[in-house]
Each structure stands twice: as C-alpha cells, then as structure tokens.
Amino acid sequence: MATTNSPSAPSRGFPLWAKIIVSLVVLLALIALAVPYFLNVDRYRDTIAEAIGKQTGRKVTLGQLRARILPGVGLTVGGLHIGNPAGFPEGDVVSADEIDVNVAIGPLLNRVIHVNSVNLVHPKVSLLTNAGGKDNYTFTPAAPAQTAPASSSSSVSLDQIDAISLTNAEVLVGSVSRGAVVPTADTKGINLTLHNFAITPMRVHDWQAESQLSGVTVTLAGFSEPVAFQSGRVSLAGGKMDAQFVADLAKASDVKGTLSVADIEHPEVDFELSASQLDIDKLIAVAGGNTPAATPAASAPAAKAPAAKADPAGAPAAPAKANEAAAAAGRGELIAKGHINVEKITTKPYTVGPANIEMRVYTDRAELFPISIGMYGGTLQISSRVDRASNPPRFTANVQMRNLDVAKVLDVTPSARGKMGGTGELDAQLLGGLSDAWKKTLSGTGKFAVRNGHLPGVNLAGAAQSLAKMSGVGSDTPFTVLEGDFTIADQRVTSKQIHLDSQVGIVDLKGSVGLDSTLDYQGSATVNPAEALGSGTAGKIVGGLIGSRVGKITVPFALAGTIESPKVSPGKGVPSFGAPASASGSTPSSAPSGQAVTPQNAVETLKGLFGKKK
C-alpha cells in the first residue's frame, strides 16, 4: 500500500530559536573582532606610561596601543622602555619588543588598572651596579603629584600585575665605569613566568619564578664563545634563587653544576661545578675575546685600559697601570664563589688530572686558589688572579710542582721521548695575557730541579772525550741532580746557571730556550776519567793509567738547534786537564789541578800514558 507525505507534517529542520542564538553569537564575535579597530585606546598611551612612571620613579616610554577583546580583554603594546635612574648611563633597565596585556574589567571601571597577565616578547633586563654600590634595579616611586580633578584622566593608577611571562628574554649583569656599561655576563634565551609582581612597593624579593634552562646561553666577559645550557632549571622564591644545570662551557667542557643566590637583591652566587674533561686549548682559543657590550660605549674602557699592553721587550705592564684600570672600574665587589672539580684536563699532547679549584669572582677580577692538579705522578699547586678590567684579561700565578715523573711527561712527545728521567720540581711566578698572543706577554721567574735522574743515550764522559779527541758518545749518564734558575721574557726562557751533578762528572750551562723550541746555550763538562771509563776490566786498566796522570777533564761546548734536534759543538775556550790528587790529598806540583792545555798538548799527554818507561 503506497504511503504519501502529508503536506501538513511538522518540519524536522534546525530550530528557529537555535538559529537566532547562533546568529547572535556570530554577531557578537564579529563585533568583538571589529570593535578594537574602531576603539582608539592609543590615546591612553601617555596616561598609562605616566602611571607606570609614578610607581617606578623612572622615565617610561610605550609603543602604540591596540585594544583586544578576544580571547580576553586587554591590549597589545608595540614596545616598552623603562629607563635607568640618574647616575647611570643612558639606556633602559627594562625594554621589550612587544607586550600583550590582559586586564581585569571590574577595577578598570574604577580607573584602576589591575593586570591579570603580561607577556613580554624579547624583553631585555640590564642589572647594573655603579662605583658607589648603587644599582639600577631598585625602584623608588616618584613624589606624588598634585591631586588632579576627579574627571582628569591622570587619576588612573596601576594596582598590581599578577603574572609576567618572559619570552626569549635577555638579562645583562654588569657594572658602570667612566659613564659606560661594562658587562660581566649576558644571558639570552630565557623563558619564564614571574608571579606576585606587586607594584607598590616594587620589590624583587617578592618575585616568584621558575624556568627551564635548555637553550639558554651566557656570554661571560672576556670570552668569545658563550656557555650553552643543555638542560636544567632555575627557581626564584622569597628572594632566593636556586639552579641545577648541564652546560657546554664555551665548547671546552661539559659542566654539571648547582648554584644559589641567597638574596637576589644583593646577588652573590655560590656554585659547585664538576666536569669529566676540560680542553685548555679550546678554552684559551675563546678566552680573551671581546667583552659583550650593552651599548657601543661599553667597550670603550677595555680599549683604553693600559694594563692590557706590554712594553716592546714583552715585559708585563707596570702594576701601577693595572691598579689604575681596576680603580677605574670601582672597588672590586664579590659576585660569585665556589668549587670546581675536573677529572681530566687536556692540552695537546698532555693529559693531567684530577683538578680541584677554589674560585672567587669579583666585579674586576677572578681569584683562583688553591688549584691542585694531579700531574704524572706528582702534584701541581697554583694560586692565580685574573684581572678582568683589562682587555685581554691579564693573569698572575704562583706555581709549585713536586714529585713529577719527568720520563712520563716526555714520553707523550715523540721528539722528547726517552731523553730524560728523574723526579722533577718547580717553583715559578708568572704573568701574562689570556689571548692567542699569550707567548708575547708571558713573563716570569723561577727555579727547577730534576733529582735522581738519567740521560739515556748521552754519555757525559764520552761527549767530553769526543770533543778532546779521546773517544765517542754513547751509553747513559745517571745524575743526582739537575737544577737551575730561569727568567721568561721576549718569548725565551733564560737561565744564568744550570748545574748537573753526576758520579761521572758535572755540567754547568747558561743560555736560553725559546718558546719556539730553539736552543742557545754555552757550557762546560767536567769529567772524572776513572769513573767515566767504566768498571770493566779494560776500563779499570785504562782508567787506572789515566787516573794516575789526569784527575779531571773540562771541555767547553755549545748547545744549539732545537729541542727536537739539538746540536752539540765545541764551545768557547779550550779543554783543560787537571792532575789527580795525591794520597795526601794534594795535587802534584808537576801537574797542577785545573791546568789549561791546548788540544794538541792534551792528546800528547794522553799518548804519553801508554809509552814505555825509560
């Protein structure tokens, strides 16, 4: 049976009331989107800037204001600049490229601005301290202006900011010297949210914040490469800041650490750092770079600092000039202190460790003491200071080394491997600059000694005999001590006296070795023939014959070439022969000790030892 639709059947389409509601929602959304384009909120720009200025006591400049209704009532500011106080260089303590502000509607009807949230895009905060100890980040409300009529727009006041979000923020910490900013550290890539940002009074102690450190970089004064954080977090509450992190130290080391600041309003950082390895070559390559500058003027003091220069002879700048540079930056104030542990330190071709360092960082210098480093069976102790007021930074260091296994040190260099053994010690005072040109500025003095050692492949007696036309070179020379003094200047290490004491004889040497490995020495070797010829049967016979007529042989020689390829040649003067002591300890009158003879006479004398007695 066919079924037909009745024309009077009720419609099942979209209800009319729903259509009306949807239409109203769409209309309201369109109005919300359109109203900001017709509402001129930019006319309040000066009023809002004045209100912020009253609460901060600073000059405030705002960019263009644009109203927004969705997703919340608020506005977008085309830029923000809060200036430095009097006594500081021209510039901003806080600036931002753009600001998104959400405000509470209720207080706004009563001409009170209560901000629910503020998002600052690429803000920059500059925290500076001048020579008088004052900072630019303590805000003091300006003196209240005369009461304006109730109808005046200037009666608008800023109440509170509940939260401030920083996106890709930058924080610069530094000091003021001669009217310019001298940065200590420049931190970039920060993303965090601040809570409890009360305006009256504005106190950093009340702020609360938390941030992840991944992607954050810190450029330190004197370094051309930044410290890059791989992971970590930082929190701020009750005026105290704590952080844990893993970071790449200017491509020279991966560092794990913790740091804390007990009072963020008077920052003094306590830190603990550890690393599995530190590459000194990479660290030196990035140290001594340009100081990060907040303004073009910030680099001016470094360029003028006289302490960064050395005299033509390569000697360090006068201490007075270094002190003047430090004084120009104001009295040094402690900003950080802590402990550093490194398991392994490398500088090609050497590897040492572990190392433990106590470090204090001031606004004008860094002090590292004590530094204790395990080194090839011995210990290296260093106390050092780095003056950061100069460009490049300059250092002073007191160095003490004990119980060094010399053979192990030389073994890592193919050209020096196996050339000496013994136990080494060193005392030195060094000065220089932290830059690629460190060799030109390095200077210092000191003394060294190698005890109970040996010179493989060098026969002290054989070398002297060869020069006197007696014998060849070979075997080995054991010695009880090799010691001397040194002075570093003009890229050379100069010694006035180097003395080697062996059972076979002694060597005295003076001259210099260059930092380019070139040798320039003059010396003399004095040999006991009886000891030199050995304890074998032939040695005893020949030694007895020679020893009865010759007590010692002194041969001058010169040492040139390079450390890798030394060259020994006859030195200034002629060989001399001394007669042996008599049984009573006196020297026979016919052959006085130390008597100088010509090489030909020396040979004739030795020939006479083997002639027949008449």
Image: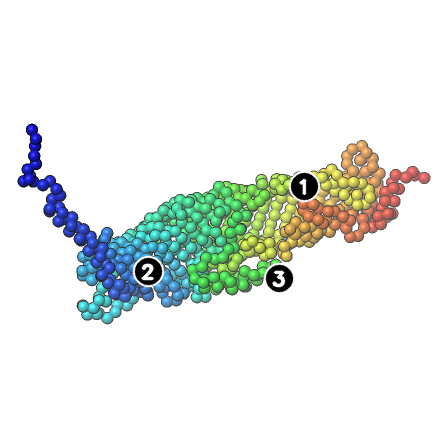
Q: Is residue 3 visible?
A: yes
Q: Which mark is residue 534?
A: none
Q: Earlier in the sequence, mark 3 or mark 2?
A: 2
In x, y percent, where is residue 327? 48, 63
The answer to whether 420 is drawn above or below residue 399 in the figure is: above
Element under label 1?
Answer: loop
In x, y percent, where is residue 409? 61, 42
Q: Earlier in the sequence, mark 3 or mark 1?
A: 3
Q: Which residue is mark 1?
A: 419
Picture quarter with the C terminus: top right
Q: Which mark is residue 312?
A: 3
In the image, taking residue 533 as reference, residue 76 lies left or right, namely left
* Quadrant of residue 12 within the rendered picture: top left
Q: Residue at x 45, y 46 (%)?
A: 248
In the image, taking residue 537 as reference, residue 480 lies left or right, namely left
Marks 2 and 1, how far apart at CA: 69 Å
Q: Residue at x 54, y 54 (%)?
A: 434
Residue reaching furthest left? 8
In x, y percent, where is residue 93? 36, 61
Q: How is the image coloured?
A: rainbow
In x, y percent, where is residue 364? 47, 58
- Give the residue type at disc 2: Gly
